[in-house]
Image: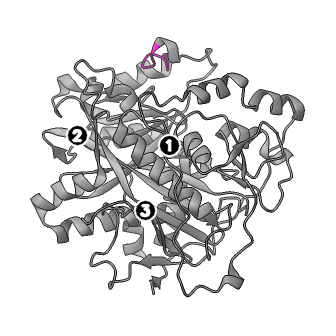
Amino acid sequence: AARFFKLPSNSDRLGTSRTARSHQTPSHSQRLQRLRPKSSHRAIKAKSCQQHIQPPRARPPPRRNNNENNDKMPRRRPTIKFRTSFANTIYDVMTARGWKETDSDTDWDFHWAEREWVYEVFDTMHLEPHQRLNHFRNGRELCRKDLLVKNLKRMKRGLQRDGQVDQAKAYDFMPLSFVLPREYAMFVEEFKRSGGVWIMKPIGSAQGRGIFLFSRLSEISEWRTDPYRHLNKDDKDPPRAEPEAYIVQRYIENPYLVGGKKFDMRLYVLVTSFSPLVAYMYRGGFARFSHTRYSSDPADIANNFVHLTNVAIQKTAENYDARSGGKKDLRSVKLLLAAEHGMAAVDRVFLAIERVVVRSLIAVQHVMIADKHCFELYGYDVLIDDELKPWLIEVNASPSLSANTKEDYQLKCDMLHDCLDIVDVEGRLRGDERSVGGFDLVYDGGVVEPDPQDCPWSTRLGTKVERENDGGD
């Protein structure tokens, strides 16, 4: 049986915010009409956005224990009706399972929704007990950069007040950060004291849009007068009265390099409940590499092909390798690290990454609105420095599920199949599973450790996901 131990939390002091967002305009019917999947989406799906990639095959249900008590098994639902506006791997996986798409606003069993739908429509609806939705109501607390920093700082301060110094230090996994323009004076004080290279990111953007590095305060002064100067022309929104909020962080100038290139790792985490906190971590994932060899030369500070690993940026580079997509699977990266540093050291690194994920979830647990209809698949971006310390870069509430290579497509389809097995709208699981496909339970009211009889290491992260049609490792 899996062993549990409790991580110290700040539950006695962290309040739970459950205030529903007020909705004035537009009307409920207007919101539904605007967010309803368009017929053009269905045309795209029918054609399939995954060109030249074989659609996933239907998979058998998760294998059950022969000694299970069938009386505990829930009654299976008839054909599952799903709703979505996405036309990528999640659509392919749901149809491969035999689920049927519906355009109904309310008559569905499963909705893989956009975040905007949750923010604008969810609070106006009543869901039936069996309906499941892929976002929590206030997911911004974890996934918006400024709110994540706020919650991590609050957790650390609470531990320090309690005298839990070691636990507080364990929360030093995000670079020193300030929110601009609100904390501009505090940032300037720190910058004048320590200098160095810093990185600016819009709090709500994705795919590397609006990100830039700087080493002089004068560049911030230019940003304050023209906050759009680092955006591409096509990315500019209508002018605002005040600059868009940014987060500024100390740049990690000593990233771990493979082949002289910087990389970060995209990891998948499934949270099925925040009250109590229940989280699974996928063993697989991938590393995203920069196209150009890393350089700390000040002359290269504006070269995004050196410093940013986002695929949306790297794919615009000259001689971009479309075959690999600038990615390498997580297991291969783990083996490369093990060859250089030994498996014991790499096991400690990957366990530290897993603990970063768990601590970030604990930090927001008591401010998240609990809802039994909701679950969330998060995309965690983690970087390792040359001292093998993991750093949390950001958490994505809508990680990209589009694929740019055959291997990427297979990884995401397998991961999504396992995700839907755990959400279990079909009623196939017992409810006490510790592993489902490539997902392993890492927190269930306390940290869950692998059974040493099944796994000789501290974590399964980065190990091979065994499939029924696979051979031995």
- Find disc 2 in the rendering and name its residue: 262
- Find disc 1 in the rendering and name its residue: 399
Q: Nearer the viewer, mark 3 or mark 2?
A: 3
> Mark 2 and mark 1 in contact (Cβ < 8 Å)?
no
Q: Residue at x 58, y 64 (%)?
A: 422
Under tag 2, what secondary structure? strand
Pointer 3 or 2: first along the chain: 2
Does any portion of residue 7 appear in the rendered image?
Answer: no
Q: Which residues are magenta?
A: 226-232
Which dot marks residue 438?
A: 3
Q: Amino acid at mark 2?
A: Lys
- Quadrant of the image containing the N terminus: bottom left
Does any portion of residue 361 appear in the rendered image?
Answer: yes
Under tag 3, what secondary structure? loop
Report the side of 374 relative to 279 (left or right).
Answer: right
Q: Nearer the viewer, mark 1 or mark 2?
A: 1
Q: Residue at x 28, y 75 (%)?
A: 457
Residue 59 lies in magenta, yes or no?
A: no
Between the residue at mark 1 and the residue at mark 2, the CA separation in whole angstroms equals: 21 Å
In the foreground, 443 or 460: 460
Between the residue at mark 3 and the residue at mark 2, the CA separation in whole angstroms equals: 27 Å
In the foreground, 235 or 222: 235
- Quadrant of the image containing the C terminus: bottom left
In the foreground, 264 or 231: 264
Q: At which x and y percent is residue 124? A: 85, 45
**Image height check: is 72 above or below 116?**
below
Q: Amino acid at mark 1?
A: Pro
Q: Residue at x 82, y 31 (%)?
A: 31
**Image height check: is 102 above or below 417?**
above
